[in-house]
Image (cartoon, rainbow, N blue to C red):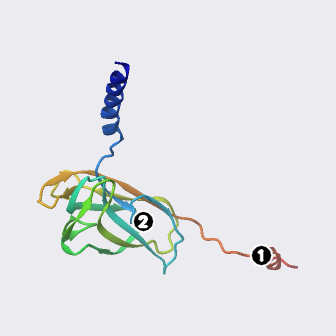
Amino acid sequence: MKNWQSIVVVAALIAFAVPALAQEAAIGVYFDLDATQSTATNFGGFDVEHTAYVMATNAEQMVAGGAFKIVMDPRIIMLSAVYPPGINYGDPLGTGVEVAITDAVVAYYGVPALLATLTLSTLNNLMDNAEIQIVSHGEYAAPTISDHLGALTEVAGDSAFLTIPVDNEAQTWGSMKALYAN
């Protein structure tokens, strides 16, 4: 009898624990295709480009599109936004963009769905945790993803942070002493 009661208790704990472990579906900016790096520390410069990805995460559905707007720190410049094959409409920094993907992405079990690839520049600006944020598209109350049947789901908008530290050059102690030689 005790074994049966133990099984019931364990089943009840699992039933309550699994939803608590589930994460909220979101559209966010990441610095890797696995959607695990939402912060990056890169070196800057006029000729340096940074790649970031707009991803739907924790969707647990087929993802066939999304609607979102990107708000960035003004020291970051978007050079381009490239979308998966399909149709896109709008301006990601202005009114927002709606993306429809030709081949829906199977976004179950934590697999992220790519909605856009961004090429960014910081020119020669130094920054600490400059924010890149996903917010609602002007037509929707929240960032939104669509499944393969066209059903819309409002999701959270996540933020990413980019740091460009002070550049340092490798110099030897001898070269430093030579600068101040008598």
Residue most extreme to the front: 1
The N terminus: image quadrant: top left
Q: Amino acid at mark 1?
A: Thr
Disc number for residue 172: 1
Residue plotted at (18% across, 52% down):
153
Instruction: Report if the CB atoms under discs 2 and 1 are less than 8 Å apart.
Output: no
For label 1, the SS is loop
Q: In this rendered view, identify the residue nearer to me: 54 or 47.
A: 54
Q: Amino acid at mark 2?
A: Asp
Q: Going from the N terminus, do you reach mark 2 or mark 1 first?
A: 2
The C terminus: image quadrant: bottom right
Residue plotted at (41% across, 68% down):
76
Residue plotted at (39% across, 62% down):
34
Q: In this rendered view, identify the residue nearer to me: 167 or 38.
A: 38
Residue most extreme to the top: 1
Q: In this rendered view, identify the residue nearer to me: 12 or 91.
A: 12
Disc number for residue 32: 2
Q: In this image, 17 relative to 101: left or right?
A: right
For label 2, the SS is loop
Q: CA distance from mark 2 to mark 1?
A: 35 Å
Residue 108 to residue 78: above or below: above
**Residue 139 quadrant:** bottom left
Residue plotted at (47% across, 75% down):
123
Q: Judge depth for marks 2 and 1 and give the one in front.
A: 2
Disc number for residue 160: none
Question: How many numbered circles does the render carry?
Answer: 2
Q: Measured from the top left, where is residue 162 in percent x and y?
A: 46, 62
